[in-house]
Amino acid sequence: MRIDLHTHSTASDGTDAPAELVRKAAATGLDVVALTDHDTTRGHAEAIAALPGGLTLVTGAELSCRLDGISMHMLAYLFDAEEPALLAERELVRDDRVPRAQGMIAKLQELGVPVTWEQVARIAGDGSVGRPHVATALVELGVVPTVSDAFTQDWLADGGRAFVEKHETDPFEAIRLIKGAGGVAVFAHPGASKRGRTVPEAAIAEMAAAGLDGVEVDHMDHDTDTRARLRGLAKELGLLVTGSSDYHGSRKTCVLGEYTTDPEVYGEITRRAFGAFPVPGAGGV
Ligand code: AMP
Ligand code: ZN
Ligand code: FE
Ligand code: FE
């Protein structure tokens, strides 16, 4: 069984529409795929409607969080998308992405880049707007060669010249909200040090005590040593270990199913979820 628990669609900053994403997931031989767009569940309905036989969809989202000034991401699985408290927090974060993107555009204009909100809004479509969309505009304008090249101190990296913060949830609050909505909380790419400062292990231990279910270990942004360290920490703290592609379509180099999650861990995640359940395709789990 091949299980990929972290992907993005055009509902946020991926480049495949949800229907296209599930079609590709089945075509690449995945049995289970989670759709985890940034701060939104709006891609789920389309993914469910287009779900190929044999593929199971795990509904989810990747919530933008911040602890002591360090940005981090929390994966939320199988929660009730209608539960009001988590829904309100998701909307707060997602809506704040618009003035924040406009702020980054204003900074870029001050730096002499002729980017406009109209251009970025066109690229984002109806997706939750983020830095990868602004980065795509910079690629279109010939400012940088690739999306990834826009994530430097010169441009959009945390603290970079054109960077603007957005509202981000305290991770302990996020865990409380996810649990309150019947979901399962997994700390996304906790050792992704290329993106900026990472959360210390002591804080992960506190999150484990506060109900965190797992940590994403097998991820493209973790080198071998980081994975070994995180695996050891997970064992010590009794956390589940997941693996995933963090697929973004053509905006990132990883492919669907590049890293996967152990079926036993997937089973435990579904057992822990109370709010909603995976959407089984014909012949699925
Ligand atoms: P935002 O949520 O708008 O702050 O944008 C963060 C997103 O940008 C992350 O979820 C990644 O998808 C993407 N990202 C962060 N660092 C990089 C990088 N170095 N190269 C490409 N994409 C990145
Ligand atoms: Zn993303
Ligand atoms: Fe992330
Ligand atoms: Fe992601």
Image: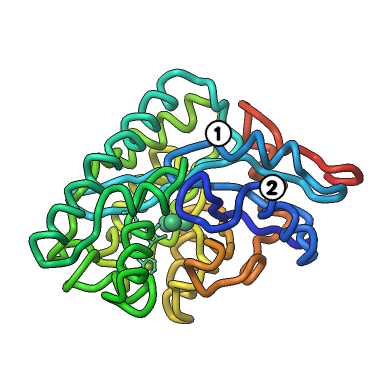
Cα separation, mark 1 vs mark 2, equals: 24 Å
Q: Residue at x 50, y 59 (%)?
A: 216
**Which element type, helix, strand or loop, lies under badge 2?**
helix
**Quick check: 93 above or below 33?**
above
Q: Regarding ligand 2, which quadrant of the image does it lie in?
A: bottom left
Residue that mark 2 sits on? 19
Q: Residue at x 52, y 61 (%)?
A: 248
Residue that mark 1 sits on? 183
Seen as rendered, the residue at the extreme right is 283
**Which element type, helix, strand or loop, lies under badge 1?**
loop
Residue 193 visible in the snapshot:
no
Q: Quadrant of residue 155?
A: bottom left
Q: Residue at x 44, y 63 (%)?
A: 233
Q: Position of residue 128 (x, y in %)?
A: 42, 43
**Quick check: 132 above or below 208?**
below
User: Which of 146 and 209 lies nearest the eye of the viewer?
Assistant: 146
Pointer 1 or 2: first along the chain? 2
Q: Residues within 10 Å of mark 2 (few under 14, many from 20)?
A: many
Q: Amino acid at mark 1?
A: Gly
User: Which of 115 and 36 lies nearest the eye of the viewer?
Assistant: 115
